[in-house]
């Protein structure tokens, strides 16, 4: 298989996908308790629609999105609401959440499901409203509300819908399993997404470390002569799955600094998101579960599991027969961009593609040292930035100086941290710069008003 499609920069970390890439998805038993945050997306929190003591059913809406950039949340089991308040969240903060104790029946809400065999014939606005109502967000980890991303300005012409099947984060194989196990649903979801954004063509990007997925999707496309779609095989390199890197590699186009893909006629959607869109349009199913890769050398039996949203991570780990040795770190997501957790009571949310467990002996802790100006971070940066200068400016609290190095173009992929011989927390420094500059801008706007 020939491949030369890639982007500038990037790294080749240990991928660790062999632990689960051949593991078929297993259905995890519905938990006895779920904790469903009212914030599972970029944007405003939902407003609760239930109270303690209410009986709820699977698929019932628990929180309503009142803001344009938000997404409703739904019950993933049937049972009684036993808690409503602030609970630990994968972000490291506490957010409002609804706690449900299962009644053991797993009964669907009547309003949750709808049979729409002709769903693809609906107009784009109606399809977008179904996506909104189902609470679908970007399932590749970004969690941006999908209906908002599909709201293309009337004056903008979308020439290409890009479907992201890259899954470049080490260890994770959930999207790989989607492409292998739900190929027909993926193709139907792509058709729906294409209809919503009125794209002229579809490009599906898959890294060359997934030849079985490439073959499966290409075979499925042969049976769709009316779908102008092609698979583009991309070089395995992190972060190939970043939106801008994917667009550059697959299409040879660049999203301008500070810009968004739709401004150059492109919309990008994840393969898992496409399947969720199909299930919502065809069957009315809201986003209440997802495939999660539970993996790492600190877990006894790595697996790909279909997990109900709101399931506590301790229950997910139990489904894999617990820790292998003494755990050192539990991460939601992959090792590059994932977030270490402080509690095993945090729930799986819509953007949780993986739970990664490292044993204590594999968790290194050492102090960082001064920058030695080796420029390895500059070579690795997929955005063409100067991470070293941003890091030094942040360390000295020179935030105005940091503006000259375009901190907001950083995608926080972690390539700079990975290659730094001084073990500097460069991404942390850049996040600090972003937060300070954003806060300063907000204060200026408030003062001006």
Image (spheres, rainbow, N blue to C red):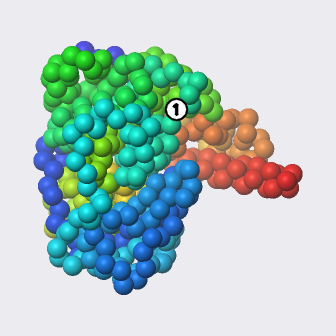
**Residue under the point 52% across and 32% down:** 152
Q: Quadrant of the rendered structure where residue 318 is?
A: bottom left
**Residue under the point 26% across and 26% down:** 208
How far across and down, in percent of the image, does residue 116 sit? 24, 43
As displayed, is residue 136 above or below residue 110? above
Which residue is identified by label 1? 152
Q: Quadrant of the rendered structure where residue 196 is?
A: top left
As displayed, is residue 135 above or below residue 175? below
In the picture, the quarter occupied by the N terminus is: top left
Closer-to-camera residue (186/112): 112
Closer-to-camera residue (142/128): 128
Inspect this view and state whether residue 214 appears: yes
**Residue under the point 57% across and 55% down:** 67
Q: Quadrant of the rendered structure where residue 352 is?
A: bottom left
As displayed, is residue 144 above or below residue 229? below
Closer-to-camera residue (297/99): 99
Relative placement, left or right, of 366 versus 213 is right
**Residue under the point 33% across and 65% down:** 60
How far across and down, in percent of the image, does residue 331 sit? 37, 59
């Amino acid at each position: 298989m020939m491949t030369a499609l890639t982007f500038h920069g990037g790294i080749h970390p240990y991928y660790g996908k062999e632990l689960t890439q051949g593991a078929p998805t297993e259905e995890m038993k519905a938990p006895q308790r779920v904790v469903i945050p009212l914030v599972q997306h970029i944007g405003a929190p939902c407003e609760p629609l239930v109270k303690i003591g209410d009986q709820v059913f699977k698929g019932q809406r628990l929180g309503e999105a009142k803001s344009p950039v938000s997404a409703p949340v739904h019950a993933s089991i049937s049972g009684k609401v036993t808690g409503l308040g602030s609970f630990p969240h994968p972000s490291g903060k506490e957010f409002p959440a609804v706690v449900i104790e299962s009644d053991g029946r797993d009964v669907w809400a009547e309003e949750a499901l709808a049979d729409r065999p002709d769903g693809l014939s609906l107009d784009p606005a109606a399809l977008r409203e179904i996506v909104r109502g189902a609470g679908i967000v970007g399932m590749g980890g970004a969690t941006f509300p999908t209906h908002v991303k599909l709201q293309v300005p009337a004056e903008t012409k979308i020439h290409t819908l890009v479907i992201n099947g890259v899954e470049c984060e080490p260890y994770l194989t959930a999207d790989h399993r989607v492409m292998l196990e739900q190929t027909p649903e993926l193709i139907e979801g792509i058709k729906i997404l294409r209809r919503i954004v009125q794209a002229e063509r579809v490009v599906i990007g898959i890294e060359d470390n997934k030849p079985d997925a490439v073959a499966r999707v290409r075979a499925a496309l042969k049976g769709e002569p009316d779908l102008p779609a092609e698979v583009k095989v991309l070089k395995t390199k992190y972060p190939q799955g970043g939106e801008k890197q994917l667009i550059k590699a697959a299409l040879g186009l660049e999203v301008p600094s500070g810009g968004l893909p739709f401004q150059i006629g492109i919309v990008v959607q994840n393969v898992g998101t496409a399947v969720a869109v199909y299930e919502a349009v065809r069957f009315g199913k809201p986003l209440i579960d997802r495939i999660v890769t539970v993996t790492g050398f600190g877990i006894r039996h790595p697996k790909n599991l279909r997990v109900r949203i709101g399931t506590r991570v301790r229950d997910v780990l139990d489904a894999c027969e617990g820790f292998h040795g003494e755990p050192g770190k539990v991460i939601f997501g992959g090792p590059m961009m994932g977030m270490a957790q402080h509690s095993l009571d945090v729930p799986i949310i819509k953007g949780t593609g993986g739970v990664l467990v490292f044993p204590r002996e594999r968790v290194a802790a050492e102090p960082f040292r001064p920058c030695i100006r080796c420029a390895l971070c500059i070579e690795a940066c997929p955005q063409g930035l100067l991470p070293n200068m941003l890091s030094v400016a942040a360390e000295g609290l020179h935030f105005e100086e940091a503006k000259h190095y375009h901190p907001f173009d950083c995608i926080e992929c972690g390539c700079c941290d990975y290659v730094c011989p001084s073990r500097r927390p460069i991404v942390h420094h850049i996040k600090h710069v972003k937060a300070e500059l954003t806060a300063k801008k907000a204060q200026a706007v408030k003062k001006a008003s």
